[in-house]
Amino acid sequence: MPRSPERGWLRPILTFAIFAAFLFVVWEGLKFVGGDPWRTETWIWEPPLEIWFASDLLLPHVWDIVGALAAPVQRGSDESLAQFLAGAAFYTWREAAIGFLLGATIGIGLAALFVHSKLMERALVPYVIASQTIPIIALAPMIVFAFGPNVLSVVIIATYLTFFPVTIAMISGLRSPDPRALELMRSYAASRWSVFWKVRMPASLPYLFTALKISATASIVGAIVGEGPGGIPNGLGRAIINFNSQYISGPEKLWATIVACAILGIAFFTLIRIAELAALRGRGLRTEAA
Amino acid sequence: MTDSSQPTSVVRVSGVDKQFTVGHGVTTALDGIDLEIGRGEFVSLIGPSGCGKSTLLRLIGDLTAPTAGSVEVNGKTAHAARRGREYGMVFQAPVLFEWRSVSDNVKLPLELLGMDRSERDARAREMLALVELSDFASHHPYQLSGGMQQRVAIARALALQPSILLMDEPFGALDEMTRERMNTEVLRIWQQTGTTIVFVTHSIPEAVFLSTRVAVMSARPGRITHIVDVALPQPRNEETREDPRYFRHVTEVREALRSGGALGAEPALVSEERMAAEGGIG
Amino acid sequence: MTAAAPSVGIPLPPRPGRLLRMGRTVRYYVPAIAVFIGVIVLWELAVRGFGMQAFILPAPSAIGAALVENWGAGRWPLFEAARVTLFEAVGGLLIGTTVGLIVAFGIARWATARDAVLPFAIAANAIPIIAIAPIFNAWFGITNPLSKMMIAALLVFFPIMINVTRGLTQVEPSALELMRSYAASDWEVLRKLRLPNALPYFLTALKVATTLSLIGAIVGEYFGGASNVIGRVVVQSASALRFDVTWAAILLGAITGIAFYLAIVALERVLIPWHSTVRGEHPG
């Protein structure tokens, strides 16, 4: 039965909002039933049970987290936590973006190499795959040692996490064009360069964007992981390390930082999604959920 | 054209209209279709792109519903006939499940019917023998040629031994020689099983070769403009293709198409892919 | 759904004998093996010949020696460490896969579920593991393997969920019509069409998930864990400046990850021999 393809943009947002509200109720509900005592000016509530992860230390109240965002980042500072995190997130994002672009370029380059040379593919693809089995957090100190405690090391780490999904996706993508289209180009005696730009690259764009969405979040994770050993003072990585060591005295700050990381990830992902919709407009492809 | 006291009428389409909402407008795919198909007939629907022949087939198969009018199959509504699994359908693409062997693909409708295992095995063997693919029972679709995959699709469509077989340009993707071979196959199967067949095609020679009657349709809106009775003797074979009567019928159909406005019709106002996505226009 | 077919449908010739096929597989991997040997040799020469900083990057021979020395005994028994880490990874894989599957089925079935859950799943995926690890360690107990399993599970959840959802929903429309022509119920469509269709997607995600689960376990260990696990060995040996052992531990972690991945590849061969990835048309 024919059905209109768009279900409207309002309904998904409403559904998400309702679900978020539901999660809020569950979160606070668990604390209500089994957390630490709730104290206000006039009234104390003692939860009847004891749920081990619902204590204020392990699961701060949602409003405390929000409140911490508005409060100064440190005693005596006139910058709020929210402002601080926004700045840190932007700083991290810039490192991640450079790593993202580099990783994407390397990924496309490697895939192009593999598509044109089966020998190189057979020789190197196992190592491309194996590279992802090495936990970057173990390699990070070594990279910092080799390249110095600076942004370069962070960018290298971000690139390392980004290039893999792009390589794998582009290998499939560059090979995806209809063999008949390739034959057509051969009948024009087209050079491999023209074939690459006029046929293979356009055909691989859907695959590329699927990988870029994964790489966007991976580059952010890489940047954050690298900032610690890299000694970068301004990014989310340092914020996480600091607030982690201060956890006992103020768990809300670490949680707020986690929220900031998540928002950064979603924002970058959405950016890529918008680029995807623009680049793939008019192809009539079903762009899937994520 | 219609005789409402026809006792052996298997498909009865009465006053059927079908409209699609495309963008902001409404397109009439079919307008006032009346058609009766008797038991054991082989009826082809032929017409230019956009004439609604595939839509008509899908209306008979209850894969879409008419905007007006009714479709009766075996004396019940098309919907009830589909629920009762009374027809088999062959699409233009074989639509085999790539994870099932040839034999398991044929067994799919039998599983859905709840047939028990030994019966399923026996019936599948029978069907594969009918389409002459017994040697390939444990192969997978990717190992078969396009023509062979379509034969598996036909075996599957016949597995429930339906009284009606609906075929939507099943050989459109095949080359001419394979297509002619498949035509002979279909005729042989038709004669062996006595199934009523409704066949959509855009090939005039194919329509004439296979059918007892050819319904010629015109486009926009889709209507049946002529019905050509094909009075060629059975069984038909390669020699039939060289029979002068065959050529006369082909010419008859071609002229019917032309006078229905088929050749030189206006260009489509809406893309075919869009209409196909909305629910299928032949 | 049915892949491009050969133009002639004669019965295929019998498959070449087992020995011949094995020979072909070996020859396929020769270039990779050559690269491996080449890099090892160059590395060894560079460390010896140029006296490169053996500090951070020891010679392969030194790493190999550390691996052998510490395999079963010594301050950091590597085999035992790998075993425990693998155990955590497998546990995390099971948990993450189960939850991922449940959510995937929910999302595929109800569009409302999709709208509600998907943004959270994307957000969860964007949170770097080093932020979550301390919290999970606090929740489940630093020395409890469960905390590492949960970290691994979190990493595993997203690729599994996304891929299985795709596999369940991206079904060829003509196949759905075919099932409708048989008046098949939603349940039958799920069992006979969506599930088999989703299997290759699931296995692809599983390949990614195995490496992620191991990484999750090791990263979790970084932040604290029982003493003899790969992550702790890395941290402790590095602070003791025994980088040969550090690299040996990393190597062992990588080898375990690769073996885990190859196990899924073997599983693919058994479960979906008809699929194009197994027939050898694409790499991994």
Image (tube, rainbow, N blue to C red):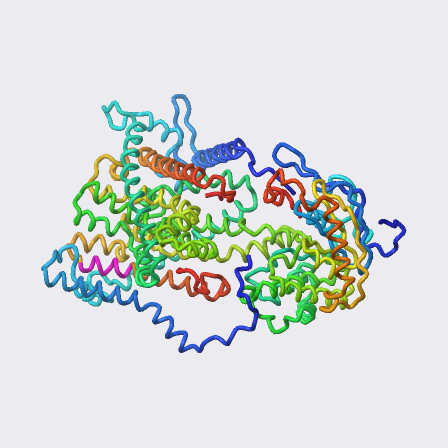
In x, y percent, where is residue A55? 38, 37
Residue closest to the eye, C145 or A34: C145
Residue closest to the eye, C204 or A119: A119
Above or below, comparing residue C35 to residue A138 in the picture: below
Stretch of the chain drawn in magenta: C244-253
Residue at the extreme top of the image, as rendered: A42
- Give the number of marks: 0
Magenta run includes residue C216? no
For this view, does A97 lie left or right of residue C17? left
Q: Main secondary structure of the magenta part?
A: helix
Magenta run includes residue C246? yes
To which quarter of the image does residue B190 belong? bottom right
Screen quadrant of the C terminus of chain C: bottom left
To which quarter of the image does residue A250 belong? top left
In x, y percent, where is residue B226? 79, 49
Screen quadrant of the N terminus of chain C: bottom right
Does residue A50 show up? Answer: no
> What residue is shown at x 46% (from left), y 33% (from top)?
A24
Does residue B214 show up? Answer: yes
In x, y percent, where is residue B152? 63, 64
> What residue is shown at x 61% (from left), y 59% (from top)?
B94
For this view, does B152 lie left or right of residue C234? right
Residue at the extreme right of the image, as rendered: B5
Residue closest to the eye, B144 or C262: B144
For this view, does A34 lie left or right of residue C227? right
